[in-house]
Amino acid sequence: MTVAKAIAKAMALFDKDKRGDIRTVSLQEGSGSGKNWTRLLMRIEYAIDGDYAESDKTPYYVSVTERLGGIVAERVKQF
């Protein structure tokens, strides 16, 4: 998978959770390179009504993996 596809999956999962507005998406670690990533861990920082305090206290991590030809995004609650 490409990083762009992984980011799109991570952002879709975050949007489904309805936690706030995305501020930044940052890559924390991954397995692969170039356009051939198999696993990426991303952190999404967000704002609730313009306030970033909740994001700082409760970071939102998403693990995106490529499995059986599909791309799966799952929230990581403990990091």
Image (cartoon, helix red, strand yellow):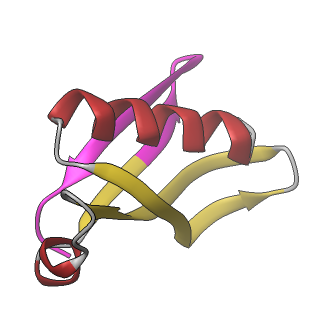
- Residue furthest toward the front? 50
Q: Say above or below: 50 vs 40.
A: below
Displayed quadrant of residue 23: bottom left
- Residue furthest toward the right? 34
Image quarter hosting the N terminus:
top right
What residue do we see at 24% from left, 27% from top?
A: 16
What residue do we see at 17% from left, 47% from top?
A: 19
Locate residue 15 relative to residue 17 in the image: left or right.
right
At which x and y percent is residue 39? Answer: 54, 51
What residue do we see at 11% from left, 82% from top?
A: 57
Looking at the picture, tell me which residue is in the foreground, 3 or 68.
3
At which x and y percent is residue 29? Answer: 54, 73
- In this rendering, the count of numbered labels is 0
User: What segment carries the magenta color?
Assistant: 64-79
Looking at the picture, tell me which residue is in the foreground, 79 or 67.
79
Locate residue 61 relative to residue 64 in the image: left or right.
left
Asked if residue 43 is among those painted magenta in the image, a careful observer would answer no
What residue do we see at 70% from left, 48% from top?
A: 37
